Structures are given as C-alpha cells and as structure tokens.
Image (spheres, rainbow, N blue to C red):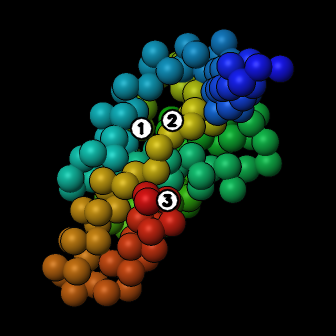
Amino acid sequence: MTRFQITALLSSFLFSVSSYALSPEATEGETLFPSCNVCHDQAHTPALGPPMWGVQRRYIRATSDKADFIQQMTSFVKAPTMEAAIHDEARGQLGLMPAMPLPDDLLNKIAAYIFEEQFPPPCDHWRFAVKKAKDSGDADHAAKDQRQLDRFCK
C-alpha cells in the first residue's frame, strides 16, 4: 500500500468516525430549531436560557432512551412547570421558559434533533459566567464554570 493510499484510508476512517447523519425526523427538527436557539444560543450575554449543550446533557442523564428523551422534553416545553424543570440552576437564575404552542409532531422532531445533534460546549457562555461570578463575589460559581472551561474548551 502506498503512502497516499494509507493517508486516504486514514482520512476516510477519521471522517467517518467524526461525522454523523441525523435521522429524517431530526433533520426536519433541525429546520425548526432556530425557534429554540433564540433563547438557548450560548452566545447570548447575559443568557436568555441555558445553552442547548447543557440542556441536552441533562435530559440524556434524566431519561432512559431517545423515546423517553423526546417525550419528556416535548411534555416540558408544552407546559413548563417548576416541578418538571430539570435544570435547577437555570430555573433559579432565569425562571421558567414560556410554553411553546407548537403541535406535538413538530415538538417531537425538534426534540429528536436536540437528542441527536452534537452541540459544541458553551465556551463563550462559561467565559462570561466566570467573569460575572467573579465580579459579584461568587467564587464557587466562578470555580465551577472555570472547571467546565478547563475541561471542555481547551
């Protein structure tokens, strides 16, 4: 095997490992996602809602599989309640999100997209949060967000 063939083979392998394809349902949800990103965009300073990277991780930890993820998320965004909110810190700082008056099939597609997408860590959000926490004297919060920056944003 030539050096070029080895390089091409490795490049093909690495691309296939790092790329992914969304399901048809999630692909449709991706087109609807901008309505969520209005508030969940990590670039907002101050934040309007928690970055989707964190929302996704919390829902994945709180649910058993994709179907449960979609059901729980859809149920919450249709009728948010304090009891059902799984992001205590965001709920405490930002309050509850408004209900999203969209049909279930559209919410399910958006939730499928959120489940499948590989969101980038919210590095900009954490940088802002560290500064804000330090400025307000909240050393614990600053340290927590700094740990996230150090872990995910090198």
- Please name the residue shown 65% across and 16% down the image: 25
Residue type beneath disc 2:
Lys
Observer-nearest residue: 125 or 108?
Answer: 125
Q: Which disc, if any, is residue 78? A: 2
Image x and y of residue 121, in percent = 46, 50
Can you identify the residue that label 1 sits on? 99
Q: Are marks 2 and 1 in contact (CB under 8 Å)?
A: yes
State the residue at coordinates (24%, 47%). Answer: 44
Q: Position of residue 37 (x, y in %)?
A: 36, 34
Q: Is residue 67 above or below residue 59?
A: above
Kindly tell me whether residue 12 is visible in this rendering: no
CA gap between label 2 and label 1 equals: 5 Å
Find numbered disc 3 in the image and state the secondary structure of the residue it sits on: helix
The location of residue 16, given as percent across then percent down, is: 70, 25
Q: Quadrant of the N terminus?
A: top right
Q: Nearer the viewer, mark 1 or mark 3?
A: 3
